[in-house]
Amino acid sequence: MEEKKSLWQEFTKGLIRENPVLRLVLGCCATLALSTSASNAIGMGLATTFVLICSNFVISLLRNIIPDTVRIPCYIVLIAGFVSLVQMLIEAYSPALKAAMGIYLPLIVVNCIILGRAEGFANKHKVLPSIFDGLGMGLGFTLTLFVMGCIRELIGSGTILGFQIMPSSYPGIILFLLPPGGFFVFGILMAITNKIAEGKGEPVSELGCAHCPMAGCCSISVEKEKGADK
Amino acid sequence: MDFKSLLAIFLAAILTENYILNKFLGICPFLGVSKKLDTATGMSVAVIFVMVISTAVTYPIYTYVLVPNGLSYLQTVLFILIIAALVQFIETVLKKYIPTLYRALGIYLPLITTNCAVLGITMLVIDKGENYIEALVNALGAGVGFLVAMVIFAGIRERLEHNDIPKFLKGLPITLVAASLTAVSFLGFQGLVDGMLR
């Protein structure tokens, strides 16, 4: 029973409490770029979730085999392999989605959520919790992307998932479909999250070295630690 | 291949197709490192460096090795490997032979491996079907565009620090809203390059 409960917790923490985008501030590039419409958001979210589950699974299986010093390159190659797989699958079954995602599809490799979870979770935990962590984080990412996609699509063109929501006389604020709208909606969502976190007495989201997947081999954080020691 | 079209590619990469503000590539360093002007410049120069060198290496490998052998599906895996190896190589060379430059730029190099802007440019120039020279100019322009956005933003953020901002907007949210306004101003360049040079 205890085991089950903790797996459930690994799963749910990614959805709200440790939401990868709004709380951990990971994967901002994909979030901003693919939230122009709700359907793009779902496509990107699910592709990332798939890669995340696979990479968490394999990395946690291999966590005792991969030498610590070369772990980052190993993870990147594993992740790139899974991304190529997804790329080919999407190309075969949904060329329209591939066209919409464009360059951002191969760029899932460098989405920091995946490397971040590999470094921060999968290489320290057993296989089953890692899979659930990947699933929860992936769905949390998809959920945030979907919410952002809905907001931008609704304000930008008056539809959600292609269905007309606003009265047909609504002209649509194109700016929300353009890059500035992405930054703006992301900023406002982040502010709301911070407000809620503040109410619960939790720290506000900040882009810090703590969540950065490269922190282990980055000299900025190493120097910071040295500074702290002094 | 006249000078004019290369200049157009270069300017477009900086202004209308700015990597950060228009294509959303490299947002993490944009938000994380743009707090101070000197770190922002150091990081950006390192990015320019790596972007140009990795495009120079990946482009011929893709065109002359992968495509003729029908291996273009290996693009993602191979490119990220090449970039990671290159970054490691540059870091080692700088550390050994040019320690002053290493102290200025080297510390940002490991961060750049997983920077989506670098992988992005190497794939985008191939997607666009540009030739080798155009690809290199585009990479340089994208890097300079990165520098421009970072420097502008470092200035804005230094101002933001001293302002009275509602508590829940402090930090990232206000930074993102400011980024949105900067992106609006970059939209103003749309059509400029075409109007000027074509």
Image: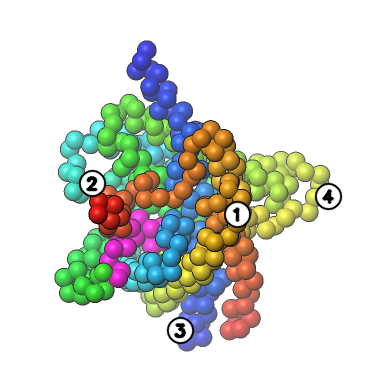
| Relative to B89, A135 lies left or right | right
Query: Which chain is home to disc 2?
Result: A
Q: Secondary structure at mark 3?
A: loop
Q: Spatial distance from mark 2 to mark 1, Cα to Cα?
A: 42 Å
Question: Is there one chain holding both mark 4 and mark 2?
Answer: yes
Question: Label 2 sits on what residue type?
Answer: Arg
Please state which of the two labelled residues, at mark 2 or mark 1, is closer to the viewer: 1
Q: Spatial distance from mark 4 to mark 1, Cα to Cα?
A: 37 Å
Query: Which chain is home to disc 4?
Result: A
Return the x and y of residue B5 as percentages of the image width and height.
Answer: 51, 82
Question: Label 4 sits on what residue type?
Answer: Ser
Quadrant for the C terminus of chain A, please. bottom left
Kindly identify which residue carries mark 1: B165
| Relative to B108, B3 lies left or right | right
Residue B127: in sight, yes or no?
no
Kindly identify which residue carries mark 4: A169
